[in-house]
Image (cartoon, helix red, strand yellow):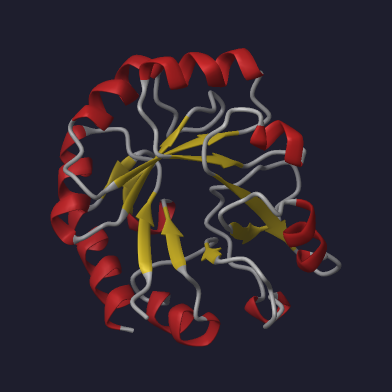
Amino acid sequence: MAVRVKICGITRLQDLRAACDAGADALGFVFYEKSPRHVTIEAAAALVRALPPFVQSVGLFVDAEPAFVDAVLDAVPLDLLQFHGDETPADCARFSRPFIKAVRVNRGTDLLKYAADFDAARGLLLDAFVAGVPGGTGERFDWGLIPVNLPKPVILSGGLTPDNVAEAVQRVRPWAVDVSSGVEAAKGIKDAHKVAQFIAKAKAS
């Protein structure tokens, strides 16, 4: 099975094009103002319009007001929603769009319960737990905490780089990998060479 690759935190057209040219399966757009990778609704709409066919657009939200999510969806034709806060299953399902739920993993995290609670999710995005930060920290977590019988597709995130993504894919066998800071030149600015390396190494594994 070929692993899928999502490049998250896209803020610039040249980064979008570089990721698509390198073979990205999905691009993530962050609708969370506290993130250095935040994009406005207007900017995201223009970026998503530039996507070629068969590359998914993913909108990332953190405990957003439903009215705000609705406003984004009215302007930006997102393929998939990604919820990265303390949203309930009902919060995630209310928009009648496919979604994935992010889980910040540490010892004691019951991923089987998450999978049962968020049974409507298309998958679980597993990220590192860092107190007070909803994600995008660039920290890696212990992959051994992932149950082998997790009944949802796993999107592996957290501390992935071109240097360790092959090991991650070989050890975890996730459905997809997700990267943001690990392929950046600066916060919100992607490094096209790192993006291409990351995708090539992930898919070769």
Q: Quadrant of the N terminus?
A: bottom left
Q: Does 103 appear above or below 52?
A: below
> Residue 41: percent from the left, percent from the top?
39, 18
Residue at the outermost right position? 108
* 190 or 205, nearer to the observer: 205
Residue 127 makes an appearance in the image = yes
Asked which quadrant contains residue 85, the reply is top right
> Residue 168: percent from the left, percent from the top?
48, 79
In the figure, is residue 60 to the left or right of 76?
A: right
Which residue corresponds to the image point at 30% horizontal and 22% vertical from the top-left?
Answer: 45
In the figure, is residue 19 to the left or right of 137?
A: left
Asked which quadrant contains residue 61, the reply is top right
Which residue corresponds to the image point at 45% horizontal and 22% vertical from the top-left?
Answer: 73
Q: In which quarter of the image is the C terminus?
A: bottom left
> Residue 196: percent from the left, percent from the top?
20, 63
Residue 86 makes an appearance in the image = no
Q: How many labels does the image show?
A: 0
* 14 or 55, nearer to the observer: 55
* 73 or 37, nearer to the observer: 73
> Residue 163: percent from the left, percent from the top?
36, 76
Which residue corresponds to the image point at 40% horizontal and 59% vertical from the top-left?
Answer: 182
Asked which quadrant contains residue 189, the reply is top left
In the figure, is residue 204 to the left or right of 163?
A: left
Which residue corresponds to the image point at 56% horizontal and 54% vertical from the top-left?
Answer: 122
Q: Does 44 appear above or below 175?
A: above
